[in-house]
């Protein structure tokens, strides 16, 4: 059985770019992560790359530091399509008036469908399956 090793690494790179972009608040960097017709479920379905990025920004825009840790990448590749399940542990600290709140942590699995494009692999659909939450969700919010 072959290893689509280069494709597997390229998908991991996209997933890591997502985490790095979020923690750096590099919203433009997310255009290298999500397909233009991407959809996402972050507790509600959003459609289109811009809407996905805006939704992410609405959670993290006013939040203090965050750290998105990813691991246990499970990737199945079928030609120009792939599916992945990636464990995530995400810590969010409040900023400004929210700095005194207990940091919010979400632990779960990113379940993604990917598509190969001329620019590389992109996420076509993302669902964050949150399995454990700790702390105060109110540290999140627009800036």
Image (tube, rainbow, N blue to C red):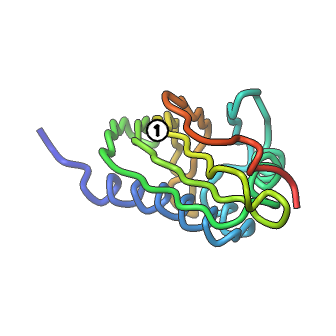
Identify the residue under disc 1: 81
Give residue 113's position: percent from left, percent from top.
52, 36
Give residue 120's position: percent from left, percent from top.
52, 60
Q: Nearer the viewer, residue 106 or 72?
A: 106
Q: Name the residue rendered at 55%, 45% in the picture.
A: 105
Q: Single out the residue that lies furthest toward the left.
A: 1
Identify whether 15 is placed above or below 21.
Answer: above
Q: Name the residue rendered at 46%, 38% in the picture.
A: 81
Q: Secondary structure at mark 1?
A: strand
Point out the image quarter for the N terminus.
top left
Give residue 49's position: percent from left, percent from top.
76, 49
Q: Nearer the viewer, residue 21 or 61?
A: 61
Q: Name the residue rendered at 41%, 42% in the picture.
A: 86
Identify whether 76 is placed above or below 52.
Answer: above
Q: Single out the residue that lies furthest toward the right.
A: 143
Identify whether 28 is placed above or below 137.
Answer: below
Q: Name the residue rendered at 62%, 46% in the picture.
A: 104
Point out the image quarter for the C terminus.
bottom right
Give residue 62's position: percent from left, percent from top.
82, 60
Q: Nearer the viewer, residue 75 or 141?
A: 141
Q: Nearer the viewer, residue 143 or 74?
A: 143
Q: Single out the residue that lies furthest toward the front.
A: 100
Q: How many marks?
A: 1
Bin the neighbour count of mark 1 within 10 Å (Cα to Cα): few under 14, some 14-19, many 20 and up: some
């Amino acid at each position: 059985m072959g290893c689509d090793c280069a494709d597997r690494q390229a998908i991991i790179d996209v997933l890591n770019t997502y985490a790095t972009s979020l923690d750096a608040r590099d919203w433009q960097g997310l255009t290298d992560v999500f397909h233009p017709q991407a959809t996402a479920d972050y507790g509600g379905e959003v459609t289109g790359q811009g809407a996905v990025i805006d939704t992410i920004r609405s959670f993290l825009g006013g939040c203090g530091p965050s750290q998105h840790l990813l691991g246990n990448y499970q990737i199945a590749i079928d030609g120009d399509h792939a599916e992945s399940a990636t464990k995530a542990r995400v810590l969010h600290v409040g900023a400004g008036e929210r700095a005194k709140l207990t940091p919010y942590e979400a632990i779960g699995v990113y379940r993604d469908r990917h598509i190969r494009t001329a620019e590389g692999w992109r996420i076509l659909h993302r669902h964050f399956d949150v399995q454990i939450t700790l702390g105060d969700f109110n540290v999140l919010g627009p800036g």
